[in-house]
Amino acid sequence: MTDLPGHISVREVGPRDGLQNEDPVPAAAKIGLIERLSHTGVSRIEAVSFVRPEAIPQMADADEVWAGVDRAAPVRYSALAPNLRGARRALDAGFTEVEVVVSASDTHNRKNVNRSTAQSLDDIAVIIDEAHQRGASCQVIVSTAWGCPYEGDVPVERVVAVAGRAVADGADSVSFGDTTGMATPGRVTALVGAFRSAHPEVPLNLHFHNTRGTGLANVLAALEMGVDDFDASVGGLGGCPYAPGATGNIATEELVHMVEDMGVRTGVDLAAMIDAAAYAERIVGRVLPSGVLRAGPRTRTIPA
């Protein structure tokens, strides 16, 4: 264990990972959400993904959305790409940060992109090379890092090996995704420790879901290991279309509310993020799971 980081970086993934799991919303609403988030103080936003429309129809308007966003200078925007074609679309659109994903679970990877994990890693090596040639960075997201809905537990050694192959091929950073919400604090400690032992120099991001109520507990376990980079989704939007029941990323406003109270800075204006969560709730037309959106911050009082 280490002392908690003084500051963490939060990547807001609601516009992509959140909205891709909702009924399609108009491009104008997506643009409105990204622009609201851009003024919350969050430093990074995953804006869109470049996928086949028949695979993820919610992201079919990625080019239109990205072209319409009034981008805020301090914010770094990124795009997710499932393959080389998607990565080239992202680079052509002007993105300088691209994320690619591979599942540690072979079964989940085939469900997701119809390829084995090994085949996807071969493809990712080509994407990394092209991104670097075009002046962009490439993060490799290893999904199902703490378990697969089809295979069950995924051994830590396999997850680290998959990430290690990506590192060897030049990945600029690695993210571990709790795609199915199967992580618990002890499992977080085990994987982070194993990866850090093998690759202490590689930047690490963690992406947790709150499917089984352990999302923020997992964040705390990671903070105690010195991790300082997390994904979160406004209002708790999101899940995984290829993992039954795996709904609900950790809510950005809940993450900010917790860690700021612990003395860990995020740079995020909590009130502005709660307002953005309320907007997200309106555009998707359903109640979102965020408790902080419902109750407000712990400092909110009412007349006696």
Image (cartoon, rainbow, N blue to C red):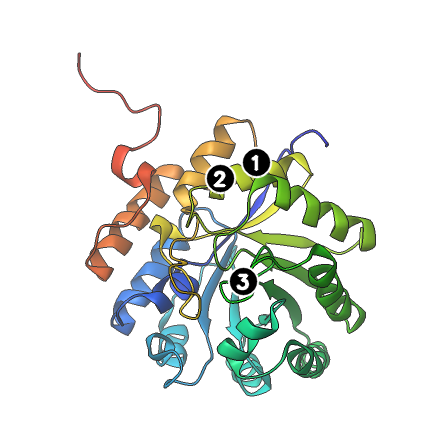
For the residue labelled by badge 1, is the local secondary structure a helix, a strand or a loop? helix
* Residue name at image x 70 percent, y 55 percent: 156
Q: Are marks 2 and 3 in contact (CB under 8 Å)?
A: no
Three-letter residue code for mark 3: Cys
* Residue name at image x 39 percent, y 42 percent: 253
The answer to which of 66 and 245 lies nearer the viewer is 245
C-alpha gap between disc 2 and disc 1: 6 Å
The x and y percentages for residue 67 are 40, 76
The answer to which of 190 and 100 lies nearer the viewer is 190
Q: Residues within 10 Å of mark 1 (few under 14, many from 20)?
A: some
For the residue labelled by badge 2, is the local secondary structure a helix, a strand or a loop? helix
The answer to which of 57 and 107 lies nearer the viewer is 107
Q: Residue furthest top?
A: 304
The x and y percentages for residue 3 are 69, 29
C-alpha gap between disc 2 and disc 3: 20 Å
Query: Which quadrant: the C terminus?
Result: top left
Three-letter residue code for mark 2: Leu
The x and y percentages for residue 28 are 26, 70
Query: Label 3, on which residue?
Result: 148
The numbered mark, 1 or 3, whose residue comes first in the sequence reads 3
Between disc 2 and disc 3, the foreground one is: 3
Quick check: 35 above or below 301?
below
Quick check: 213 above or below 134?
above
C-alpha gap between disc 1 and disc 3: 23 Å
Three-letter residue code for mark 1: Leu
Query: Label 2, on which residue?
Result: 216
User: Could one spot residue 97 in this view of the protein?
Assistant: no
